[in-house]
């Protein structure tokens, strides 16, 4: 594979693997097809089978690239180190929003990113139940189903500032004092969902569409944020570490803030953390 990214080939692979291994089990899972990796952290046979199939499809597209899949890392934590090993690396989240998938909630997604020398150069999100494919490369605009998308302007009255913004705040992985502080700081906001979880494969498109103004994430695994982070940035939004540094898909420490509009990032950061 040369400098031209295989955008359509990856889209086709995601759709086809999803149709074969994921959709036939949606709302049809039996109890022995759902497992717990950790407390509240679910995985299904559909996650595992689709990741194996998608891994092979991506290797067929780019044989020299390493592959880091969420379920492969769950089975062998050493696999995660491949994400920061240099060269090209495929990142896979076979079902983002497994909890939703298990409950029969249609807000789940398939996500893929291509990282090169520690930089995300391609991002794909497939929302199968909505039939929406979001794509971006480091050198091209973000698209939805092939149409260029730009982060929507805020729907709130300008004078409302932070209090009028819609947010998705996930405090679970922060320490106790930080969780308490965050809850106090958003207490005056009416349009904030607190610790509702949900798929990053919907949170990032919600930022692009204007349904969300910002999202605060605790965990920072590459399969959760590399695809959507690039799509959001190429649409005009921002995703950064809490210290203001650029998002790094090889970094797994927690704390990531995304905003629908790049110019809002500092305002939201100050409102949440002072």
Image: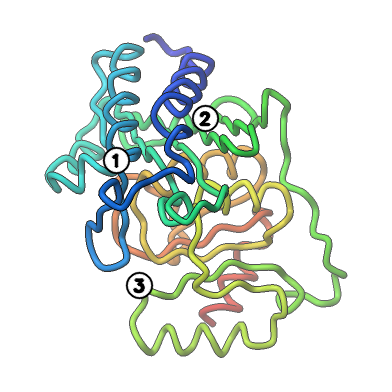
Figure check: 95 above or below 160: above
Disc 2 crowd rating (10 Å Cα; few below 14, some 14-19, many 20+) is some
SS at mark 2 in the image:
loop
Looking at marks 1 and 2 on the same chain, the residue that comes earlier in the sequence is marked by 1
Q: Position of residue 71 (x, y in %)?
A: 25, 43
Looking at marks 2 and 3 on the same chain, the residue that comes earlier in the sequence is marked by 2
Cα distance in 3D space between marks 2 and 3: 30 Å
The residue indicated by pointer 2 is: 138
Cα distance in 3D space between marks 3 and 1: 27 Å
Figure check: 127 above or below 202: above
Relative to the observer, which residue lies in front, 82 or 14? 14
**Mark closer to the observer (1, 2):** 1
Looking at marks 3 and 1 on the same chain, the residue that comes earlier in the sequence is marked by 1
Q: Which mark is residue 228?
A: none
Disc 1 crowd rating (10 Å Cα; few below 14, some 14-19, many 20+) is some
Relative horizontal placement of residue 1, taking residue 204 as reference (left or right): left
Disc 3 crowd rating (10 Å Cα; few below 14, some 14-19, many 20+) is few
SS at mark 1 in the image:
helix
**Mark closer to the observer (3, 1):** 1
**Mark closer to the observer (2, 3):** 3
The residue indicated by pointer 3 is: 173
Relative horizontal placement of residue 80, taking residue 34 as reference (left or right): left
Who's the residue at 54% across and 82% down the image?
A: 274
The residue indicated by pointer 1 is: 45
Figure check: 177 above or below 266: below
Q: Position of residue 203 (x, y in %)?
A: 57, 54
Who's the residue at 47% across and 56% down the image?
A: 103
Q: Is residue 116 visible?
A: yes
Relative to the observer, which residue lies in front, 183 or 96? 96
């Amino acid at each position: 594979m040369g400098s031209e990214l295989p955008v359509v080939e990856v889209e086709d692979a995601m759709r086809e693997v999803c149709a074969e291994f994921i959709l036939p089990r949606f709302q049809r899972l039996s109890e022995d097809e759902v497992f717990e990796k950790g407390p509240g952290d679910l995985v299904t046979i559909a996650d595992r089978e689709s990741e194996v199939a998608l891994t092979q499809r991506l290797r067929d597209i780019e044989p020299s690239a390493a592959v880091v899949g969420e379920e492969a890392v769950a089975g062998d934590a050493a696999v995660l180190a491949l994400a920061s090993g240099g060269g090209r690396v495929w990142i896979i989240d076979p079902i983002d929003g497994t909890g939703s998938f298990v409950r029969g909630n249609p807000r789940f997604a398939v996500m893929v990113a291509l990282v090169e020398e520690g930089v995300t150069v391609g991002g794909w999100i497939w929302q199968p139940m909505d039939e929406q494919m979001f794509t971006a490369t480091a050198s091209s605009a973000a698209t939805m189903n092939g149409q260029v998308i730009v982060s929507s302007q805020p729907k709130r009255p300008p004078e409302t500032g932070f209090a009028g913004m819609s947010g998705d705040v996930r405090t679970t992985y922060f320490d106790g004092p930080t969780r308490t502080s965050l809850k106090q700081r958003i207490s005056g906001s009416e349009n904030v969902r607190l610790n509702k979880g949900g798929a990053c494969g919907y949170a990032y498109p919600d930022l692009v569409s204007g349904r969300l103004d910002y999202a605060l994430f605790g965990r920072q695994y590459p399969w959760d944020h590399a695809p959507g982070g690039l799509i959001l940035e190429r649409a005009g939004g921002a995703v950064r570490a809490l210290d203001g540094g650029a998002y790094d898909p090889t970094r797994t420490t927690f704390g990531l803030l995304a905003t629908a509009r790049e110019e809002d990032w500092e305002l939201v950061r100050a409102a949440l953390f002072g």
